[in-house]
Amino acid sequence: MRIRLYIILMVLGLPALAQDMAQFRVIYQGSGKLSNRDFNKRVIQWNLDIGEHSSYFYNPVFKAMKQEVRQLDSNTLNDKNTNSLNDAFAIMDKYPLSTRYAMEVYCNYPEQGVYTYEWEQLKPLLYSDKLPVIDWHLTDSTKQISSYTCKQASGRVAGREWKVWYTADIPYSYGPWLLTGLPGLVLEAEDTEHYFHFLAQGTERLDTPEPMVLISEDTAIPCTHERFLELRQLCYMDPEQYAFEVIGFDERGNNNYKERNKGLERYCLDREEF
């Protein structure tokens, strides 16, 4: 109960300032195997919004949940009003955990050549770093994805090898996550170990441009890339210690996480190296 309350309180706050306006949107189906103990891949929708200067990659289900919770009165929630808390829990329950993922990636923000990464467990963590320059190997292989002719390329970023299919028919040099820098839009991508796969389900030009806003930039904990990796690993391996470090929640039980997580490997888009 108290952990869920912390989640709700951290969602609230003033909206972040708009950075760029989305003019084009790609909808991907993403699938991922998150650990060596998972039998099935988790399937989640991702949106890639593209503006004049930048791109914004996010899970629309998580974004919708956060925006709805933000509409609740923060003062009432801080007073722990039972009805309002139940309303917040009801909102969260409308968005199944299996359909949402709290990661957002903004490329070429706050400036060209920089990406900003937000990831949330209990409280959002936020860092900015130099956008990786991928040494893409282009091939002559082609295939059709929807109505687009795509070419294949391969490259290494953040410790993983990727094979992607991009189309020059859509002249945006973006793709899922940090897969940028090709002469066209990435419509399909898969790492060579087959843990992660993204496939475009549709594209659309927005009739009315929409602000591209990191959901919790105003309430996030700013950190370095290195500190983010430390906290993420701590979250996976010792969630009680993680809760203490990020929100001061100190009600630890008798869980022996060291023993429970022996042999556990967590898979992330990056291998914790850049």
Image (cartoon, rainbow, N blue to C red):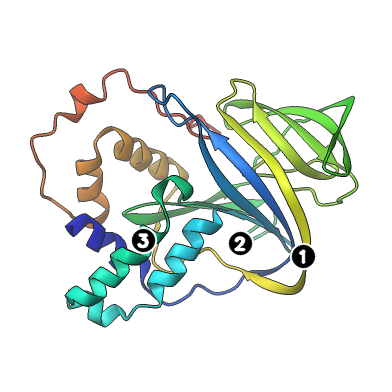
Q: Residue at x 60, y 50 (%)?
A: 46
* Front label number (1 vs 2): 1
Relative to residue 262, is residue 138 depicted above or below?
A: below
User: Do the CB atoms of the residues marked 3 and 2 lie less than 8 Å apart?
Assistant: no
Amino acid type, residue under disc 2 in the picture: Pro
Disc 3 packing (10 Å; few <14; some 14–19; many ≥20): some
Q: Residue at x 43, y 40 (%)?
A: 226
Q: Secondary structure at mark 1?
A: loop
Give the label on residue 110, or none: 2
The residue where tag 1 is placed is 52
Q: Is residue 234 left or right of residue 47?
A: left
Q: Nearer the viewer, residue 79 or 28?
A: 28
Residue 18 location (% of width, % of height): 59, 73
Residue 166 location (% of width, % of height): 81, 39
Q: Nearer the viewer, residue 194 or 242?
A: 194
User: Do the CB atoms of the residues marked 1 and 3 lie less than 8 Å apart?
Assistant: no
- Residue 216: tell me if it is visible: no
Q: Earlier in the sequence, mark 3 or mark 2?
A: 3
Residue 137 location (% of width, % of height): 80, 26
Amino acid type, residue under disc 3 in the picture: Met
- The answer to which quarter of the image holds residue 211 is bottom right
Q: How many marks?
A: 3
* Whole-number angstrom distance, CA of label 1 to CA of label 2: 13 Å
The residue where tag 3 is placed is 92
Q: Residue at x 18, y 57 (%)?
A: 1
* Front label number (3 vs 2): 3
Q: Earlier in the sequence, mark 1 or mark 3?
A: 1
Q: Secondary structure at mark 2?
A: loop
Q: Nearer the viewer, residue 91 or 108?
A: 91
- Residue 95: tell me if it is visible: yes
* Whole-number angstrom distance, CA of label 1 to CA of label 3: 33 Å
